[in-house]
Amino acid sequence: MATTKFKTVSGINLKDQLDQDADSYDGTNQQSQKEGFGANLKYLLVGLFFGIVFVKAEIVSWFRIQEMFRLDSFHMYGVIGSAVVTGLISLQIIKRFNIKTRSGEEINIPSKTFNKGQIYGGFLFGLGWAITGACPGPLFAQIGSGFFVVIITLLSAIAGTWTYGLLRSKLPH
Amino acid sequence: MDLFEMIRKPWPWYVAGPIIGMTVPVLLLLGNKSFGISSSLRHICAAVIPANISFFKYDWKKEIWNLFFVAGITIGGFIATYLLTNPESFMIAEKTQTSLSQLGITDFSGLMPAEIFAVENIFSLKGLIFFVLGGFLVGFGTRYAGGCTSGHAIMGLSNLQWPSLVATIFFMIGGFFSTWILLPWLFQLVN
């Protein structure tokens, strides 16, 4: 697999106080400068736009997820596939031209390290994905769309995450 | 057809996919943020119920952007549903409709099956399975896997991370198993 040109963050030079494991880098903030409440609003705006796409492309639909797992429609494969291709090309451009962040910092994407959690956890999440018709992003969009019962699903997902944290040292990794 | 009319109709995959993919560079360029949504659930745990568990003892405030992001997704869902309402009726693949009819689903008019995602189901076996159990698996599984569809399938694959490919493959295996083997059995329980 291609090595990334990005600076790989190992546990030693880690700036934040997250646990020193790969999981802590999921959706992580690698910016050294602090951001206040106002600055964080721009991520709310990105999320807002993202939520609109989720609903307008019907990715939040339980039925669309069923179509995907029953191989009856190309829609979801097209969405995820073209999203990956777009992400891949834009990361290549960022690397090639060494594009910096808006505040001039070097782009920093921590590498993912393998552990068996990606197998066991991945499978368990897959089970839940087909039952709820949602991954974590669409859960929020479904609630916004007025499916208030999904609040229960979200609370249970938070409980699931909490339980993982509790049992973590006893689980195979 | 005017632009507003076009926006209100369902968006095809080749419009939605690239926009979602653009989230990866946009978040990086805005503030060096890696795309990933399931971590928001961990931050909520860390902020609200850390309970002295080491996994939740970290500076979640540094990651607060992620909570702003999911708040945005919720508002976006509202806007898309109530202000950009789809003028057409919801269409689902005929084969899926046939298969799901056999499982006892009859209402195919909304984005979500009304027979399952109804408030009166909260305190029933249906609710326990589709909301509580399903949600628990999503939260437990994504954290155990170290990411979800956004963190692994989109962010990880875009950055050519092979552990993310492993995770994505097992997301799909889990989903296929759930759809073809688990769901028929679960529907038998609730019907």
Image: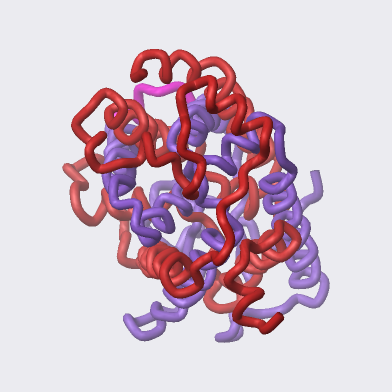
Chain colours: A purple, B red
Tell me: residue A161, above or below residue B126: below
Q: Is residue A86 above or below residue B38?
A: below
Query: Closer to the camera, B29 or B180?
Result: B180
**Residue B1 appears left or right of A131:** right
Horizontal side of B127 relative to A51 (left or right) equals left
Give the camera-side residue of A9 and A151. Answer: A151
Magenta residues span: A167-173
Q: What residue is drawn where x is 49% and y is 64%?
A: A51
- Residue B177 vs residue A81: left or right? left
Q: Position of residue A54 (x, y in %)?
A: 54, 59
Q: Is residue B69 visible?
A: no
Q: Nearer the viewer, residue B71 or A115?
A: B71
Q: Is residue A114 visible?
A: yes
Q: Quadrant of the N terminus of chain A?
A: top right
Q: Residue A115: which quarter of the image?
A: top right
At 71% from the left and 34% from the top, the residue drawn is: A72
Q: Is residue A31 above or below residue B45?
A: below
On the image, the x and y values in percent for residue A6 come to 69, 62
Q: Residue A111 lies in magenta, yes or no? A: no
Q: Nearer the viewer, residue B21 or A69?
A: A69
Q: Is residue A35 above or below residue A51?
A: below
The x and y percentages for residue A53 are 57, 65
Q: Residue at x 56, y 55 (%)?
A: B89
Q: Is residue A170 magenta?
A: yes
**x and y percent of residue A124 in the render?**
48, 27
Q: Residue at x 54, y 20 (%)?
A: B102
Q: How many marks?
A: 0
Residue B72, picture quadrant: bottom left
